[in-house]
Amino acid sequence: MNFKKPAHADDSEITDDDIIIRYEKDEVIGITVLHASKRTSVSEKRN
């Protein structure tokens, strides 16, 4: 998901839950959720 177009990241980090946060000049410009198809919603986990 990009929050800015055009998005040209100059830095990024990966979180413990496999989300990549992309930055341009210390501003968050996008995120990528790794393994998104394997994730389930909270309501699905309750059932």
Image (cartoon, rainbow, N blue to C red):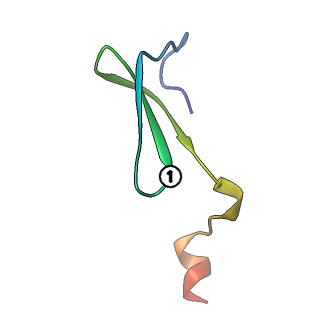
Q: Amino acid at mark 1?
A: Asp
Percent from the top left, x then y, of residue 46?
A: 55, 87
Count of numbered marks? 1
Secondary structure of residue under mark 1: loop
Side of 34 where 14 appears, left or right: left
Q: Residue at x 52, y 74 (%)?
A: 42
Q: Residue furthest left?
A: 26
Side of 12 where 6 appears, left or right: right
Q: Residue furthest right?
A: 37
Percent from the top left, x then y, of residue 5?
A: 54, 13
Q: Residue at x 48, y 40 (%)?
A: 20
Percent from the top left, x then y, of residue 22?
A: 44, 28
Figure check: 42 above or below 26: below
Q: Quadrant of the C terminus?
A: bottom right
Figure check: 22 above or below 9: below
Depth check: give the residue in front, 17 or 28. Answer: 17
Q: Which residue is mark 1?
A: 18
Depth check: give the residue in front, 42 or 31. Answer: 31
Q: Residue at x 40, y 56 (%)?
A: 16
Q: Quadrant of the N terminus?
A: top right
Figure check: 47 above or below 14: below
Side of 33 where 10 appears, left or right: left
Depth check: give the residue in front, 5 or 33. Answer: 33
Depth check: give the residue in front, 39 or 4. Answer: 39
Label 1 Cα crowd, 10 Å radius (few <14 / some 14-19 / many 20+): few
Side of 37 where 3 appears, left or right: left
Quarter occupied by residue 25: top left
